[in-house]
Image: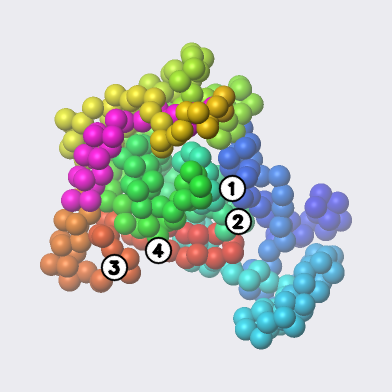
Amino acid sequence: MRRLILKDVHNQEVIFPYIGGEEVNTSPTNIHRRYVINFGDRPEDECRQRWPDLMAIVEANVRPERLLSAQRSKSAHGLRAGIWWQHYHHARELYSAIAGMDRVLVVNCGATQHLGFVFLPARMVFANSLAVFAESTYAAFATLQARPHEIWARFFGSSLEDRLRYTPSDCFETFPFPLGWETRADLEIAGNAYYEFRAALMVSNNDGLTKTYNRFHDPDERMPEILKLRELHAAMDRSVLDAYGWNDISTDCEFLLDYEIDEAEWGSKKKPYRLRWPDEVGDEVLARLLELNADLAREEARSGAAAPSKRLGKVNTAHLIEEADTGRLFS
C-alpha cells in the first residue's frame, strides 16, 4: 500500500483502512491492521484511467473469483461478475449517514463472550461482522454499554453455544431508549469516565476487550484498576437507570454463573462467572423495558407512525438499517 501511494499519491483516494470483529475484540487500541481497495460505484473506465495499478491488483485477485462464482451460480453472482471491480455491497446509506463524522460507535456481531462497544474512525471500511452506529457521543456509548441494554441483548439476541451474537435487528432496533437520553449530561459524563478509563487500562495491560472483560468478570481478579473499572461500570449503570427514572433499582452486582454446570464434569476448568445483577433485579429491569417498549408501540400507533418492520415496539430514535457485506448501519 505504501509503495503504491508513494508511486502515485492519488491511490490513497480509494485505499481505506479495513476492520472486523477480531481487531475490535483483541487489539488494545481497537486498531485496524488491514487495508482495502474500494472504488465505490465508479465505472470501470474511470477506475482504469485514474488508478491503473490498483485496478491491476483487483483484476488479478478478484475478477477470477467473481467469474468462478458466476459459473457456479446463475443468480446474483452473474451480475456481480459484470462489475467485478466493485464491492458486492456499497452500504451507501451507511456511509452517507456517517459522512463528515470523525468517529462512530461499533460492536462485534460475531459470537462473543462479552458485549463491548467502541468508537472507531468513520473513514474506514467495516466488515460485516460489525454493526456500525451513527453515534459519536459518550451518552450513546453509556446507554448501549450499560447493563440494561446488555440484559435486553442477551434476552433477544441469538447465541452460539454460550456466546452472544448481537443481532441488531432484535437487540437494537427494538430497544426502548430512555426519553431524552441524547441530551443528558450525566450519561455523557459517566460514559466518558468509563470509556476513557477502560481505553487506558487496555493499553497499559496490552489487553483487548475480550481479555479485559475476562478479568472484569473473574471473581479472583483483584487488580486495583479492574476494581475501579467495576466501580465505573456501576456508576454508568446508575446514570442509565436514573435516565429511565428507575431510582429504586440497585446497581449492586454479584459473581454469578451464567448457566448451570455439572461440577463433577466441569473439573478444573474456569467456571463461567459473570459480574451481574441478581436474577430478580435483571428480571425486573427486563420487565420494565418490555413495558416501556409496548408503551412506545401504542403511542406510535395512536400517532399514526409507520408500522415497524419488527416489533415488540419501536426504538424512539431514528432507525435506518442496512445489512451489507461492507457494514451495517444503525442510526
Q: Is residue 169 above or below residue 153?
A: below
At x 86% / y 51%, what residue is drawn?
A: 3
Query: Of all residues shown, which one is farthest toward the front?
Result: 264
Q: Amino acid at mark 4?
A: Leu
Q: Position of residue 270 (x, y in %)?
A: 54, 27
Secondary-structure class at tag 3: loop
Q: Residues within 10 Å of mark 4 (few under 14, many from 20)?
A: some
- The answer to whether residue 331 shows anywhere in this view is no
Q: Circle 1: is it few (<14), some (14-19), or many (20+) Cα within 10 Å? A: many
Q: Nearer the viewer, mark 3 or mark 4?
A: 3
Q: What is the span of residues highlighted in magenta in the rendered image?
A: 270-291
Count of numbered circles in the view: 4
Q: Given contact means CB atoms under 8 Å apart, are the residues at marks 3 and 1 in contact?
A: no
Q: CA distance from mark 3 to mark 4?
A: 12 Å
Q: Residue at x 50, y 44 (%)?
A: 163
* Mark carried by residue 320: 4
Dots 2, 1 in contact, CB < 8 A: yes
Cα distance between the residues tagged 3 and 1:
29 Å
Q: Quadrant of residue 87?
A: bottom right
29 lies left or right of 249: right
The residue that mark 3 highlights is: 308
* Secondary element type, mark 2: loop
Residue tagged 2: 127
